[in-house]
Amino acid sequence: MKFSHRFFLLFILTLTFYASSSMAHIDVTEHGIDVFFDDEFEQTKVDIQYSRDLVHWLPKGEALLELPEGGHFFSDELDEGSKFYRLKQTSHFTKPVLIVLLDFSDTQFPANVVHPERSHEDSWSQLMFGLNQGEGNHYWNEVSYGIFQMQAASESYGIANNGVIHVQLEEAAPTSESYKVEDQAWIPAALDKVSEYMDLPSYDVNADGMISNQELSILFVINLPFSRISGAGAQANIRINHVVDGVEIEKFTRTLSDYSSIGVNIHELGHHIFNLNHGQDASGTTMMGTGAYNEDPTITKFTSTYSKWGTRPAHLSADSKIRAGFVEPMAVGESLTQIPLYSAVSPYYNVVRLPAIDGYVLIENRTQEGYDSSLPFAEGHSGGLIATKIVEFRRFLRTDPDILSYDFADYYRFKDYQDEFSIGGYRIYNISEPGEKMTFDIEKLDIAPAIVDYRYNYWIPDPNRAGYRMIDFLPKNTEEIDFNTYSLSESPEDRYYTINLQAIYNTGDIISVNHLAEWESSDPYLNLQKAMVNYGTDAIIRFRFDASQPYVDRATLSVQYEDYQHNLVITNLPDLTNP
């Protein structure tokens, strides 16, 4: 990227302004500019070449008479004749994190084979709090634009204040079966040992007798193979409520000693620190999805000479960055042209928010750079516009909503490549070529939202991927579904078999109406169980077979929503009356 001398000087002066107002010292080095905060440990230093203030974008309609509350000030203009206000708000913050290495009486943490001179304590501290490529705070620095860093917890173990404590339990490691970690005595026993090396009550900032995730996040690295763990290899927000030194540790997160790269560990801390959710993920496009496993071509896990698993996790998606406080969306409700959209690795990254019938749509620009270098754009492509629909959960908007696809090429858009779509009563068009700065136009359509059609969907086996499922879509007048076409299980009574009804709107929205429709089965052998989800905004309609009732091989589902009424027959039901 090219900068003029005038812009670079203005940039430095702006940095000096916010740094001085945040009680920080700036040092210029041959590698860039470093900022150090007086009231925090040195591990929280931020490489200012990525840093910026939180930018809030507003369309320039009527004159902005006063600034919003919260310390906003006008930013410099990035473009001549811009149609948008850019307001800044200094918002750097850190969250304390403690890494607990948990050994058993007969185990020893695996060595660092990449840097054998480092102890396991030093290795984990550098991995999580380091500022080099593939290290935790380097990742957060790029993804948060210098706004957030993890702060190493204060402790006196080994290398004091590097945020890592190694504990060894009295009991031996299990050698058979698998164990639910929170049901064992391992974590409470380890916390008791941790208290010998740190002042845990000092982290009870609000003095309520409990240490929350926001006050101190504790990541346990358990030295066991995955085969000894019941459930996922890593998990966050696990309730423990263990009292140590008069304060209660509310929750913990855990990982395994073999997970010696940042991907999975940062993913779990994303849950733990920011309460970020999973969401639909197309081919590893977000760190809160399978993007946590993305690989750097040159960096390995520090316990391996060949495995690159999780060494270059993808950026967070737009909704996660908003929730974490790294970006504020620009809300648009009217027609606008030439809206600038800066990429996720640009210091000017921005997100556009559009209203939708049941939520909102976020539009962002992603490019194959930085921690997003592993995004699987199609050959010859390196960036594009992505739209994400948010209700109470997130899902990417596919270019063709009738095709369920996890191929990233079906999600992004740029000039002459799937470059127009409609959603929520808005038309998105005139999308530019991909790059650090894209532009696009929004037209607010003169249309009242109305349902124009319905469709059903259910899970079937994916013919192209053994062991995987995919969604099949059926028109509203479908008369029969053969149960044998479902993604079957050897134990049908234990498997989720569902049916879903969606309303298709003239605005391009496709919305589940399961929670509002009335569902009935013609026979007591096949019951329909409605389970409300997503805070009442949707429901799962599940098949439940009652083996105490006489077996029937078919049942008719009666479905009604508003003026739509339909009978749908499910044939070839499994016989569970004779186990």
Image (tube, rainbow, N blue to C red):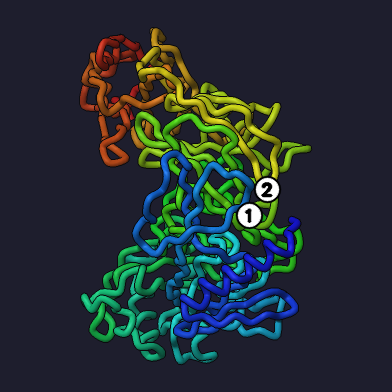
- Which quadrant holds the N terminus? bottom right
The answer to which of 205 and 297 lies nearer the viewer is 205
In percent of the image, x 45 and y 61: which residue is there? 73
Q: Residue at x 32, y 32 (%)?
A: 540
Q: Seen in the image, is 373 located left or right of residue 176?
A: right
Categorize mark 2 by other alpha carbons within 10 Å: few (<14), some (14-19), many (20+).
many
Q: Residues within 10 Å of mark 1 (few under 14, many from 20)?
A: many
Residue 560, picture quadrant: top left
| Residue 387 against residue 326 in the figure, above or below | above
Tell me the SS state at disc 2: loop
Distance (Cα) linking label 1 and label 2: 8 Å
Between 534 and 232, the residue placed more toward the observer is: 534
Could you tell whether 563 is left or right of 337 in the image? Answer: left
Amino acid found under the numbered disc labelled 1: Val
Residue 436's mark? 2
Q: Position of residue 465 (x, y in %)?
A: 62, 33
List x then y, in percent, for residue 2. Answer: 75, 57
User: Is 499 situated above or below 30?
Assistant: above
Q: Quadrant of the C terminus?
A: top left
Residue on which the image places disc 1: 345
| In-image side of 37 versus 560 (left or right) | right
- Across and down, in percent, residue 396 comes to 51, 37
Image-quadrant location for residue 61: top left
CB atoms of marks 1 and 2 within 8 Å: yes
Q: Is residue 432 left or right of residue 209?
A: right
